[in-house]
Amino acid sequence: MNTAPLATDSLDTWLDYWSHVHVTGIDLGLERVIPVAEQLGVTSPAAKVLTVAGTNGKGSTTTTLASILNAQGYKVGLYQSPHVYRFNERVKLRGIKVEDQLLIDAFVKVDQARRACDLTLSFFEATTLAAFVIFKDQECDVWVLEVGLGGRLDVVNVVNPNVAVITNIGLDHTEWLGDTIEKIAFEKAGIMRPNIPVVFGGKQQIPQAILNKAADCQATLYALDRDYFYTLNEDGQSWSFASAGTTLNLPTGSLAVDNISTAVAAILLSDLHVTQEAIAQGIHNAKLPGRFEIRQIKDKTVIFDAGHNPHGVEFLLKQLRNFLNYNKQYTQVSCVFSMLGDKDIQSVVGLLKAHIQKWNIAALTVPRAAELSVLSSALTGQNVEIFDNVKLAFQSALDDTNKNQLILVCGSFHTLEAVWEYLQECQ
């Protein structure tokens, strides 16, 4: 499709257009993006920029950062991906999803700029640049940016951050980023810039690639369990943050404390004025669909979690064990499960199966879906029931679950999306 839509066309028309402009959906590298970004004037914003990379926890960390800064009264532009239900979720102003027309107007500018440069853009590149255009035009005080894939060659990296955050490093997207922790860490470390603070929030040994990049940039590295710490309080409702010269008592909120503490560390290292009250309020307000999201549906307790790799599932299980420890009425967990075929299904199932008494599985209806035979093979020896689709798998779990059982929906954002669609249809 060569003819661009008009500013009066729908958002769906524009999204379809961007999915056809470039030959591939993922094309890492900044050679095509930088000239267009410079044409748009978004590479060096007047705003403060906090950029977050990592394998897992980026969404929770960016959500918490934006929520705290919004609570302080800053005008915050938040960019995240992927979306769960509507594309507009990727771009928020003051915590609110942008309207279609704001996105469309930005798409017009991005398309004009890329044509002026005689370049193509992938869907992700074009939509990310559109978010930057919106933040610039709306004169946001702070941009909070979530890296899509890797860091060094991701389109988000065309903007220079004032603070860089790397949540953790795990083996995911190995076909794009490399097949070792060090190779992946090298890509994530690409968001660092000279003489800025860098926060590493992984509960793991700091990869050498991150240490090397920080040294090269003369960037000061602050690491979890080395330079900042958190301790859960016995009440289960609060926790303590500690770093050199700073101790804060804060609410737990609804997101993982690992990621909340990393966001707090980044806030404190920025030169933005933020009070303890705003930090506490921001943590309380921060919500994110699909990150250990607990909902009551037809008097049943359902937990949605988008963990789709071993590192993410380890994190999920840590939260699940904590939840069950405080809610001892739940003695069994049934799981509505499906995954993408290019993920490490064996490892994910290996972590989960000791905690799951019943599995309801189905194949996803997306191009990269794992075949049902692959899912079944990984679950050999487990109590498994197979369904034609995820919606039926969830409906059965809802019907069969008693008050002592918990339903866990996990394996992929697409698994969660299918259940959410079912719930929308039931309303």
Image: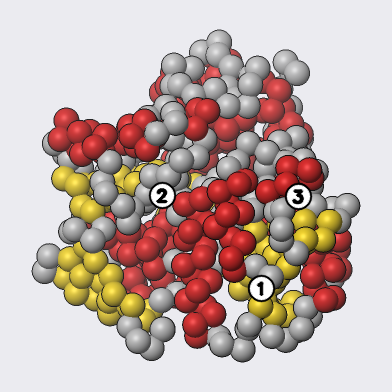
Foreground residue among 178 and 140: 178
Sequence-wise, the earlier of marks 2 and 1 is 2
Q: In the rendered structure, find residue 376 and report the number of the disc placed on it.
A: 3
Q: Which residue is mark 1?
A: 333
Taking the spot 69% from the left edge, 70% from the top edge, the residue there is 357
Residue 409 visible from this viewpoint: yes
Taking the spot 26% from the left edge, 34% from the top edge, the residue there is 209
Q: Which residue is mark 2?
A: 144
Q: CA distance from mark 1 to mark 3?
A: 19 Å
Q: CA distance from mark 2 to mark 1?
A: 36 Å
| Label 3 CA crowd tier, 10 Å (few <14, some 14–19, many 20+) | some
What amino acid is at disc 3? Ser
Q: In the rendered structure, find residue 213 and report the number of the disc placed on it.
A: none
Residue 366, position as x, y percentages in the image: 76, 40
Q: Quadrant of residue 341?
A: top right
Whether residue 304 is situated above or below residue 328 in the rendered picture: above
Q: Kindly give the residue lying farthest to the front in the view shown.
A: 381
Residue 269, position as x, y percentages in the image: 21, 56
Element under disc 2:
strand
What amino acid is at disc 2? Val
Residue 70, position as x, y percentages in the image: 41, 63
Whether residue 125 is situated above or below residue 199 in the rendered picture: above
Q: CA distance from mark 3 to mark 2?
A: 40 Å
